[in-house]
Image: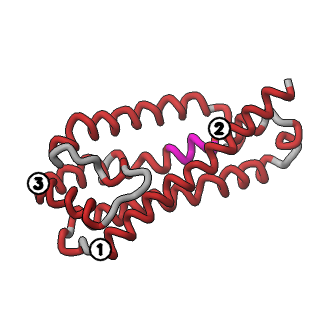
Amino acid sequence: MMLRLSRHAAALCFVCVAVFIVMTAMEFLYFRQLSGGLPSLDMRFTGFTPDEGMAWLTALGRRGSEIILVWHYLTFDLLFPALLSLTLASLILATGRRLKNFRALPAQLQFLFALVLVLPYMLADYAQNIAVARLLSDFQSANPDSLSFASALIVTKFALLAIPAIIIAVFHLTGQRQR
């Protein structure tokens, strides 16, 4: 499995990009209409204030919250964090195997390295999805503390996503220089 994962990096990238495009299209073409033009909490890379979170939830109302819960959190975002993590791991392995020192490591250690880099992002993304889904499904749970927690998880998710992305870029650039 470990060797096959790096061989399927291109296919995983294609599927990941396709799912991302669908999710982004739904955000801009449908979800923002439900919220009066406000971006979803997931799209706020730097987080949001409790007031901004409440404004989004209020603008959505019960119907909009249910739609986003079903069409985003219980469908696409149930799959996407794992898919993106698998794609990132495959890219780490594929770009790492171009490097002499990385290639010399046992396959299990290479896989463990990739897993350690992507797992924190995946866990943070799922935790953030649960926090926001709870806000959407139970408006009474939306208080400054729960909104601040969801915001912190969103910022954490994107910060942790940057780590494997940077490693992939470094591996790619280093591989280019070794040629």
On the rendered structure, is 107 left or right of 35? right
Q: Do the residues labelled 3 and 1 touch (CB within 8 Å)?
A: no
- Secondary structure state at the residue bearing disc 1: helix
Quarter of the rendering containing residue 69:
bottom left
Front: mark 3 or 1: 1
Q: What residue type is labelled 3?
A: Arg
Question: Which residue range is magenta in the image?
Answer: 84-89
Give the distance between the C-alpha atoms of the residues marked 3 and 1, in whole angstroms. Answer: 22 Å
Per the image, the residue denoted by label 2 is 91
The first of marks 2 and 3 along the sequence is 3
Q: Is mark 3 on a helix, strand or loop?
A: helix
Q: Which residue is drawn at 26% across and 36% down?
A: 28
Q: Residue 63 carries which label?
A: 3
Which residue is found at the position 12% from the left and 57% from the top?
A: 61
For residue 70, the mark is none
Label 3: few (<14), some or many (≥20) within 10 Å?
few
The type of residue carrying mark 2 is Leu
Disc number at residue 144?
1
Q: Position of residue 5 (x, y in %)?
A: 64, 39
Which comes before the other along the chain, label 2 or label 1?
A: 2
> Going 85% across and 23% down the picture, which residue do you hit?
179
Image spot of residue 100 (x, y percent):
88, 37
In the rendered image, residue 59 lying in the magenta stretch gets the answer no
Q: How far apart are marks 2 and 1 (CA)?
A: 38 Å
Q: Amino acid type of disc 1?
A: Pro
Using the image, determine if residue 17 lies above or below residue 58: above
> What residue is shown at x 18% (from left), y 56% (from top)?
65
